[in-house]
Image (spheres, rainbow, N blue to C red):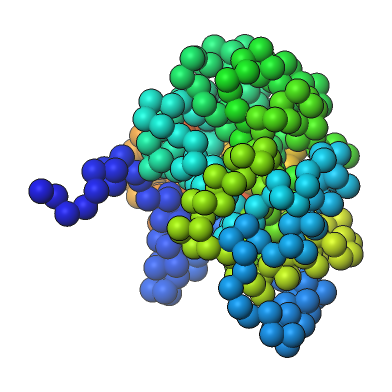
Amino acid sequence: MAFLADILSRVKPSATIAVTQKARELKATGKDVISLSVGEPDFDTPQNIKDAAIDAINRGETKYTPVSGIVPLREAIAAKFKRENDLEYTPAQTIVGTGGKQILFNAFMATLNPGDEVIITAPYWVSYPEMVAICGGTNVFVETKIEDNFKLTPEALEAAITPKTKWFMFNSPSNPSGAAYSYDELKALTDVLVRHPHVWVLTDDMYEHLCYGGFKYYSPAQVEPKLYDRTLTMNGVSKAYAMTGWRIGYAAGPLELIKAMDMIQGQQTSGACSIAQWAAVEALNGPQDYIEEARGKFEERRDLVVSMLNQASGLECPKPEGAFYVYPSCKALIGKTAPSGKVIETDEDFVMELLAEEGVAAVHGSAFGLGPNFRVSYATSTDILEVACERIQRFCAACK
């Protein structure tokens, strides 16, 4: 009898974490490495949020919290959804987790039975399919196209739905492509979902506040109220407020589902960190100036990276509407020979040769379910991005 569970054979390690670790190891040997693989803002957490955490410590807010979160935070979450998304939820319809990952994992754990299908748009965040696999579900991948700016069409969604479909996993703006759906694009998808009442919607809105060029953000249940009773809307403070290490994600949805997720979490981690929760209260209720400031800087970086990568030989880089990633195609470089003499046969070969030759760490597109592409995070300074993009240009020009 094997000691380790069979499920481990169906789960892969996170490619983004693996690439980041490889870059760290090379840097430790003295190599000049620029990492464009990390999915977190380079800005510091705003001071008012840090002060709220310090105040919570000084007040003695250091005990266990309710499984679903402290009441002030659940109230702040309900107020946020009403204020920003025109979605009415009571605090009892909300739940707080240790990061967005736990929210998603709990939702799948609470609802998936063997054979239940989850529709996931490719490219996708690397953790979605692994969570589904761990929870016993079946992944149904629907590939998007670069000519559609990596957005799912209603026809493709319709074709993917079967009687076994339990969830449609939706992410806008997208990690890794940065693609965000306009009201009309989202309405076309929700029209499909309305016709299939057995399909629930799990929407990952983590990058909601990082949209550029005047793009207006919408969430599925906001566009189509008929989906309200079968939608779990997930968000968090990590990207919008530069609070990745605080590990606070949250969601709102039907009370029965929230209660089921509470039960799962109660046997897992119980409540999230008390101090981080009080910091999140200030993030949601306090001044929002930081968001606009960060958004402006990210938009400048996006424009710089898109321009420079499109000047690189063999790369095609669409301009995304949001998040802090671009997802260029390296299709024209497949089959060429890298400066090391190795033939580039896959997008993984491309990023590994780029890291070895020029010290730039990116993540291969096949890890996100769609290649030959690679993901570049522009959550770092303009100066660093300029140097990194110059190195990418040089590497691409040297491939023959």
Q: Nearer the viewer, residue 165 or 10?
A: 165
Q: How many marks?
A: 0
370 w.r.t. 78: above or below: above
394 w.r.t. 145: above or below: below
Q: Is any part of residue 379 visible from this angle? A: no
Residue drawn 38% across the image and 25% down it? 115
157 w.r.t. 87: above or below: above
Image quadrant occupied by the C terminus: top left
Residue at the far left in the pictured view: 1
Q: Is residue 310 left or right of residue 113?
A: right
Residue drawn 62% across the image and 15% down it? 196
Q: Is any part of residue 7 visible from this angle? A: yes
Q: Nearer the viewer, residue 148 or 7?
A: 7
Q: Position of residue 137 (x, y in %)?
A: 41, 32
Which quadrant of the view contains residue 260? top right
Residue drawn 10% across the image and 48% down it? 1
Q: Nearer the viewer, residue 126 or 203?
A: 203
Q: Is residue 245 left or right of residue 164?
A: right
Q: Is residue 280 left or right of residue 271?
A: right
Q: Position of residue 345 (x, y in %)?
A: 36, 34
Residue at the far bottom in the pictured view: 58
Q: Position of residue 21 (x, y in %)?
A: 42, 62
Q: Position of residue 211 (x, y in %)?
A: 78, 43
Residue drawn 17% across the image and 54% down it? 3
113 w.r.t. 251: above or below: above
